[in-house]
Image (cartoon, rainbow, N blue to C red):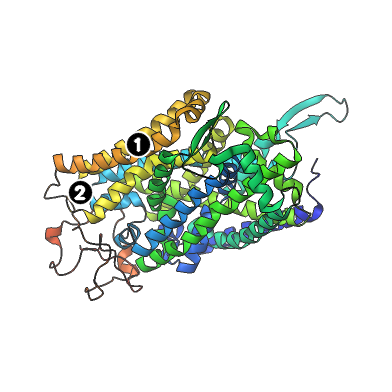
Amino acid sequence: MLASFSWLDWTIVLTYIVAASVIGLLCRRYIRSLADFVVAGRGVSAFLGVATLSGTEIGLVTVMYFAEFGFTKGFSALSVAVLAGVSMLFVGLTGFMIAGLRRSGAMTLAEYYQMRYTPGVRLLGGIIIAVAGILNMGIFLRVGALFLQKISAMPEIINLVDPISGDLIASLPVLNLIMTALLMLVLAYTFVGGMVSVVITDYLQFVVLSAGIALGTFYALTNHTVGGFEGIVQAVSDRLGASGFNPFVRETSGDAVLGLGIVFLIWQAMHWLGTSNWQTYALRTTSVTSPGVARQMFAFTGLAFFGRAAIPMLWGVAALAYFTHAGGLESFEGSKSLAAMPAFLAEILPWGALGLLTAGMLAAFMSTHDSYLLAWSAVICQDIIAPVARMFGRDLSDRTRMVVTRILILVIGVFVLYWGLWYEVPGTVWGYLAMTGTMYIAGAMMVLSFGLYWRRASVAGAYGALILGCIPGLVYIVASVISSKAVGQANDGWNAVAWAGLTGYPLALAGMIAGSLIWPRRDDEPVAPAVPMEMPPQTPQPRVPDAESLQAIPLESTPTTQSDSPPPAEPDVLTRDTDTDAEQEPHRDN
């Protein structure tokens, strides 16, 4: 039943599971407040931030969908890896958006919306990112369970038989059982330890994952059936033609449409530039010790983000070469392409190496899930439930918020299990994930960047950007729920996923500019003067309050208008992207 796995492999995997779970449970003693639970007390250093951000975003799902992308697109898939790495490096070097967000003191991105715009913008932003994020996470369990099933050679079905009569009692789908077990494992320590648990276990997972990826890459590229780099190139040429090498090419080959095309690449460039607004990224930004550390974290993460895409893509391309030369490629056509990479690794890895790689991938799975569960539960609690409660005259205490956040973690986990069991992804998994991300990123990118750098950005513009940026992605997802097959055919025919994704950004831009010009900012709206991303070194720095004084500031408090602020000589802290490591906490005018 488990032919691919030896006792050594299972020992390695189980040892890691126990170690990670114990660490997560021990972190409970460090949770004293909501800030500890959600943003780890804002005490994450640059090095630890790189490890935990990379650990979160180099998930098992990441490895699976990028491997599938390499398997179906060949070397052209690497263009996405380049765009991801360059975008993160640009954000880190310039501080674009992230430094201003960290300096604002917001715990979530939507909380910044209230500080810069109004509570209504915060509520809408929280709703959109929660919906988009939970839909994005909805297929994680299924993808992770498929990897474990294929790499360990588990059967599709387990039959329960009466030991006395021999009658069949029930047939249980193994994939569903693995999904349930994985969810319970992740919930156990995320539910208890919060972001402190996430950061510490992410660091452990980053180390284990790095070792597993190194082993997998070595065996994948040196396998004699793959044929080395020459064998891979030959297989890509035979199966994909010019589209397997040139990402700008999109051509028809028989009944199939191959390649990415210029529309897809432009969409991906916009997507990666705005990805720092995604809540799991934003949580790392708000968890670090200062804006300067946030910039360092993103700059160093650029290389990791190139690698997190490029290496799995190479695994996918190697799997294409392996099954082309050894036979069996037809088993992974269409929607079955996701299973090609784990099936390939199960055949080429020796005992011990298979266990270590699986432990690394399980580490990656846990790393992504714990952060995503915490991110979306924090958004719903901080940006939807708490503001609504305040409208009815009730302020939620830190203790109440932690209880609500933990309950939401459980509820989201159950939904993710349900969604993963029945939803059928049209096209590639990466196309679905990028589309659900675009539902929020398109609008959020305009709301945050214009809020930081354009004085005239108004509440109407923020509403317009969020709503219009969300529409194309929402229509795509609803259409795929109605008929996944029809949407898949549209993807093959006229690249529907790329057009829908790209459309969200100009719509959001138009919404922000038109809304702000037609309904200008009122005098009583918060305002942040537009400034360049880099300020002169001699610019005076505001006095930094200590952590105890900041705890007295309500999370939903709206900053005062500029008319109540100190003299103009002191720059506005919500927009200035210059920083020093001494700026441990933001300055707010009371």
Q: Which residue is mark 1?
A: 503
Of residues 513 and 181, the one drawn nearer to the viewer in this rendering: 513
Q: Is residue 541 left or right of residue 31?
A: left
Residue at the image point whose x is 76% and y is 46% from the top: 347
Residue 280, image x, y percentages: 45, 52
Determine crowd level at label 2: few under 14, some 14-19, many 20+ residues with C-alpha closer than 10 A.
Answer: many
The residues bearing labels 1 and 2 have C-alpha atoms spaced at a distance of 21 Å
Residue situated furthest right in the rendering? 164
- Label located before the other in sequence (1 or 2): 2
Q: Amino acid at mark 1?
A: Thr
Residue 386, image x, y percentages: 34, 46
Residue 149, image x, y percentages: 70, 41
Q: Secondary structure at mark 2?
A: loop
Q: Is residue 271 visible?
A: yes
Q: Quadrant of the C terminus?
A: bottom left
Q: Amino acid at mark 2?
A: Ala
Residue at the image point whose x is 55% and y is 53% from the top: 310
Q: Taking 29 as reference, is 351 above or below it? A: above
Residue 561, image x, y percentages: 16, 56
Q: Which residue is mark 2?
A: 457
Q: Is residue 119 left or right of residue 401?
A: left
Q: Secondary structure at mark 1?
A: helix
